[in-house]
Amino acid sequence: MTGMEIVRGVAELRARRARWRVAGDRVALVPTMGNLHAGHLALVEAARRHAERVIVSLFVNPAQFGEGEDFGAYPRTFEEDCSKLAACSVDLLFRPNVEEVYPEGWEGHTRVTVPGLSETLCGAARPGHFTGVATVVAKLFHLATPEVAVFGEKDYQQLVVIRRMARDLCLPVEVVGIPTVREADGLALSSRNTYLDPEERRRAPALYRALCEQARILAAGSRDFAAAAEAGAAVLCAAGLRPEYFEVRRAGDLEVPHPSDSEVVILAAARLGRTRLIDNVAVRLNAEAGSTIIGGP
Ligand code: PAF
């Protein structure tokens, strides 16, 4: 674990960042909740390409979990996470405890809300989730003052919310999205995949298959987004998943798309046993050059 500093306190993080600023080093931040897998390590690698210094934060943020959600059960694998990050030449791991981030608790804490975007799709099923995410990410941006921050495209709505939050608050950070890393059978890597039992694990790739199937139909020329949503949800039900939503939205702002839009993203969330799976596939719709599935097989 040579070279990686582990910092718990806000003051130490600020001090380290200030020294790097004096040295002229750019910083890339990778916010995580730990239980790191190859998807997170791809974010770290991308961060390394953008800046001289890489900070990873590891904080299971209670503010983004709703009542009855898996905050308590969320896998915490600190030792393994540290070894993986040190092997990727991360400069600093910021690992605050809840009191460091919310010294007076979350109840009366100032909140950052991106209206509209936070209430649709995952936000409809998880009220308050994106306010918890936007608030903690805004705090991390203020503390680490990164030039670049890297997030996975698997959480596409989260990426859109964070971009919008950074733009609206004039935060001088470039928010970079990195393509989803998948298992050989297409299942998107996620810390929550550890909840799946063997039978559920066998069924889980149906989510990505359903997204790709509808992406192919749109890429072939259909602009019937409602039919795509209905057919995708039906395929998930037939595969034994319980769809929460299956929708086609405009890429970038998640508005309901128009047939003339140049890029859409198909997003879905589904329950499988006690696991909530989310995934998405983007499709570039270009009448002249032909359509392309972005991130598809
Ligand atoms: O994607 C995550 O792991 C979390 O939502 C994030 C961005 C680290 C904020 O807690």
Image: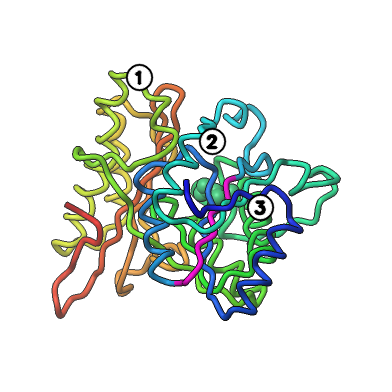
Position in image of residue 218 (x %, y %): 21, 59
Tell me, yes or no, whether the highlighted magenta stretch contains residue 57: yes
Q: Which residue lies furthest to the front in this view?
A: 2
The residue that disc 1 covers is: 197
Position in image of residue 90 (x %, y %): 47, 56
The numbered disc on residue 78 is: 2
1 or 2: mark nearer the eye: 2
The residue that disc 3 covers is: 131
Whether residue 23 sits left or right of residue 177 in the image: it is: right
1 or 3: mark nearer the eye: 1
Q: 127 or 279: which is nearer to us? A: 279
Q: Residues within 10 Å of mark 1 (few under 14, many from 20)?
A: few
Whether residue 90 sits left or right of residue 139 in the image: it is: left
Position in image of residue 152 (x %, y %): 42, 55
Q: 104 or 4: which is nearer to us? A: 4
Q: How far apart are marks 1 and 3 (CA)?
A: 31 Å
Query: Which of the two labelled residues, at mark 1 and mark 2, occupies the earlier sequence position?
Result: 2
Say if mark 2 contacts mark 3, CB within 8 Å. Answer: no
Q: Residue at x 53, y 48 (%)?
A: 32
Q: What stretch is highlighted in magenta?
A: 51-58
Q: Residue at x 33, y 52 (%)?
A: 180
Q: Judge whether 122 appears above or below 256 on screen.
A: above
Q: What residue type is labelled 1?
A: Asp
Q: Residue at x 63, y 76 (%)?
A: 21
Q: What residue type is labelled 3?
A: Thr
Find out if the beta carbon at label 1 lies less than 8 Å from the nearest ligand 1 atom: no
Position in image of residue 209 (x %, y %): 22, 42
Q: Distance between the residues labelled 1 and 2?
A: 23 Å
2 or 3: mark nearer the eye: 2
Q: Looking at the magenta stretch, what is its main secondary structure?
A: strand
Q: Helix, strand or loop at disc 3?
A: helix
